[in-house]
């Protein structure tokens, strides 16, 4: 059987790639996609821990299902907000959306 | 786990059920009412919230007991009870100050989203399981993202919604990663079962502290403390003012209740570590909030930075991690919520009169409306912590809790910061009382706004003068955690 640590390393890498994307990408849609990578890392963690440690208890499983349902809702709202800002500014570059600072 | 549903379980979620009914009524009313009658919607919402408040107050008091209900998802205790009352009150005031605000106040979905968010907060206050906690936080946040960007015709509002969403989504993901690791280490999702599993297990302290930091980053975003405070001024400035009021009061208070519960219930093994982390965050929040507030020209941004500083003060009570500490935070939150609601109520009224949120436009407010200026004086002096107002008592309590827990350095830095804070509140009041008014025309106050600010400011005075009832409640809430 594949050791648990492999899953955890995969999840940690995915999380770091996502975090890098959030911090480094300019395009708002790309930032949202990077957030999705981070959430997927969470799901891999949850499902792996569930399978190895508490296979008899479904709470880890249920948690993962809830995470992706909520993530879908969050992206739906996110894209709506990005469209509303695109209609006014004709841009989705996060660094150009800086009307307010300090 | 879920045998039969007992009356206790129903009582524990009675406020949420009541909010759900109000939500359904608003939804149907929006569909049924003809367009020109949409002005009734805030009144329907406010009436529903008032009924919910009374129902919650009378029927759901858990007394000294505290029990886990719904399969360990929620904890029915005094802390949750007080929090729920506070959020419902904040939603009530927010609804009243939304009346006549731009064109948002005629839209049914505005009230619908606000009620959904309130329901999320009431669940946050009671959550005893990370799954429930995550769901409650998202139920609170997602409607707030939309509400912050609700004025689609306004550049600042759309930008506020956009920034709030991006920061919120990222910090939620970070916090969830922390939750997933906690689940892995402990094999349970229940906050109250975690600490037992951590004692028995052998998790290296640095790993555990790292996980706690991930969770704190997410919660720090909700309460807007350093270093997760960047979003607050921009979002507060851009969002519709009633929503800013709601964000800066109820949403912040909900974050604090979660913070208190999770830190005390789940991480007693690394108490000293998280005390240090939160202590540093508290000091940094106070300094950043107060110092940057000195230079602000916009009243909403000023109040945003003042809110960051206030989160720092309240955090002192959390860091104390004692019964007095928790009671002082609860009292602080009661005072802070009603004071900030009064302040933002005034911001809304002045915005209706002069169409601007710049501090310069508050010039000579006292000549145009002495009563309004008086309310503003009381609210701002309470924020600054001047006796006999609520803010003074609240500050005394958190500093006392810090001293009692041998954290004198934190209390000293807190007092120093109160002095810096006093300066910028007085600058605004100087403008209000000594500035030259641009016009002599008296400011008209809509009845709904009048009710909202009078109710809030009376509570500020009450919490400052008659301390016992509020403090007894706060102590009972603290006792339910220990």
Image (cartoon, rainbow, N blue to C red):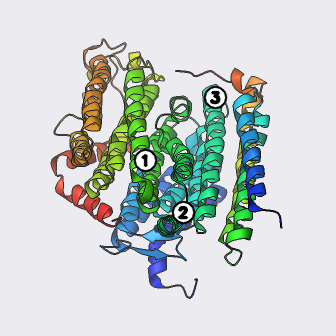
The answer to whether residue B25 is visible is no
Horizontal side of B103 relative to A24 (left or right) equals: left
Q: Mark 2 and 1 residues: CB-CB less than 8 Å, in contact?
A: no
| Label 3 to label 1: alpha-carbon separation | 44 Å
Horizontal side of B383 relative to B277 (left or right) equals: left
Q: Which of marks 2 and 1 is in front?
A: 2
The answer to whether residue B408 is visible is yes
Whether residue B291 is situated above or below residue B60 in the rendered picture? above
Quarter in which the C terminus of chain B is drawn: bottom left
**Which residue is pictured at 26% across the width and 44% down the height?**
B402
Pointer 1 indicates a residue of which chain?
A: B
The image position of residue B296, as x and y in percent, is: 43, 19
Q: Confirm whether circles 3 and 2 share one chain.
A: yes
- The mark found on residue B154 in the picture is 3
Whether residue B387 is situated above or below residue B333 in the rendered picture? above
Marked residue nearer the N-terminal end (3 or 2):
3
Image quarter for residue A22?
Answer: top right
Q: Which of marks 3 and 2 is in front?
A: 2
Marked residue nearer the N-terminal end (2 or 1):
2
| Label 2 to label 1: alpha-carbon separation | 17 Å
- The mark found on residue B202 in the picture is 2
Q: Mark 1 points at which residue?
A: B273
């Amino acid at each position: 059987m594949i050791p648990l640590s492999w899953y955890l390393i995969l999840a940690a890498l995915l999380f770091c790639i996502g975090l890098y994307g959030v911090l480094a990408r300019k395009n708002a849609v790309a930032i949202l996609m990077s957030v999705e990578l981070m959430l997927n890392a969470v799901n891999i963690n949850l499902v792996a821990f569930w399978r190895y440690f508490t296979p008899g208890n479904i709470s880890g499983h249920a948690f993962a299902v809830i995470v992706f349902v909520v993530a879908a809702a969050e992206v739906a709202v996110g894209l709506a907000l990005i469209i509303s800002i695109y209609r006014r500014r004709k841009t989705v570059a996060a660094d150009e959306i800086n009307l307010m600072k300090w | 786990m879920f045998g039969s549903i007992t009356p206790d379980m129903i009582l524990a979620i009675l406020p949420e059920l009541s909010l759900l009914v109000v939500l359904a009524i608003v939804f149907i009313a929006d569909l049924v009412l003809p367009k020109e009658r949409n002005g009734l919607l805030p009144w329907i919402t406010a009436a529903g919230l008032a009924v919910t408040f009374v129902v919650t107050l009378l029927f759901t008091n858990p007394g000294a007991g505290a029990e886990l209900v719904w399969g360990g998802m929620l904890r029915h205790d005094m802390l949750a009870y007080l929090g729920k009352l506070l959020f419902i009150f904040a939603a009530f005031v927010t609804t009243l100050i939304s009346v006549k605000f731009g064109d948002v106040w005629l839209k049914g979905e505005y009230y619908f989203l606000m009620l959904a968010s309130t329901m999320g907060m009431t669940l946050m206050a009671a959550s005893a399981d990370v799954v429930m906690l995550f769901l409650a936080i998202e139920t609170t946040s997602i409607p707030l993202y939309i509400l912050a960007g609700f004025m689609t015709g306004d550049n600042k509002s759309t930008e506020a919604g956009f920034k709030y969403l991006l920061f919120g989504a990222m910090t939620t993901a970070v916090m969830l990663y922390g939750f997933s690791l906690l689940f892995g280490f402990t094999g349970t999702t229940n906050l109250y079962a975690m600490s037992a599993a951590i004692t028995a297990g052998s998790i290296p302290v640095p790993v555990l502290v790292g996980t706690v930091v991930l969770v704190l980053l997410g919660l720090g975003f909700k309460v807007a403390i350093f270093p997760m405070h960047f979003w607050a001024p921009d979002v507060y400035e851009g969002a519709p003012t009633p929503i800013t009021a709601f964000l800066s009061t109820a949403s912040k208070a909900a974050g604090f209740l979660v913070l208190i519960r999770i830190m005390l219930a789940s991480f007693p093994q690394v108490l000293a570590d998280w005390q240090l982390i939160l202590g540093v965050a508290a000091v940094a929040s106070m300094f950043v909030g107060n110092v940057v507030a000195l230079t602000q020209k916009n009243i909403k941004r000023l109040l945003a930075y003042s809110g960051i500083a206030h989160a720092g003060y309240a955090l002192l009570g959390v860091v104390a991690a004692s019964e007095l500490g928790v009671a002082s935070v609860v009292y602080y939150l009661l005072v802070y919520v009603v004071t900030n609601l009064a302040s933002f109520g005034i911001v809304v009224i002045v915005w209706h009169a002069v169409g601007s949120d710049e501090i310069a436009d508050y010039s000579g407010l006292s000549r145009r409306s002495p009563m309004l200026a008086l309310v503003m004086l009381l609210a701002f002096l309470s924020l600054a912590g001047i006796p006999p107002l609520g803010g003074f008592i609240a500050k005394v309590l958190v500093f006392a809790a810090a001293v009692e827990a041998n954290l004198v350095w934190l209390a000293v830095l807190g007092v120093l910061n109160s002095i810096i804070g006093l300066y910028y509140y007085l600058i605004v009041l100087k403008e209000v009382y000594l500035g030259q008014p641009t016009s002599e025309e008296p400011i008209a106050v809509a009845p709904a706004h009048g009710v909202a600010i009078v109710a809030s400011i009376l509570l500020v005075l009450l919490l400052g003068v008659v301390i016992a009832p509020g403090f007894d409640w706060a102590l009972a809430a603290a006792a339910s955690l220990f």
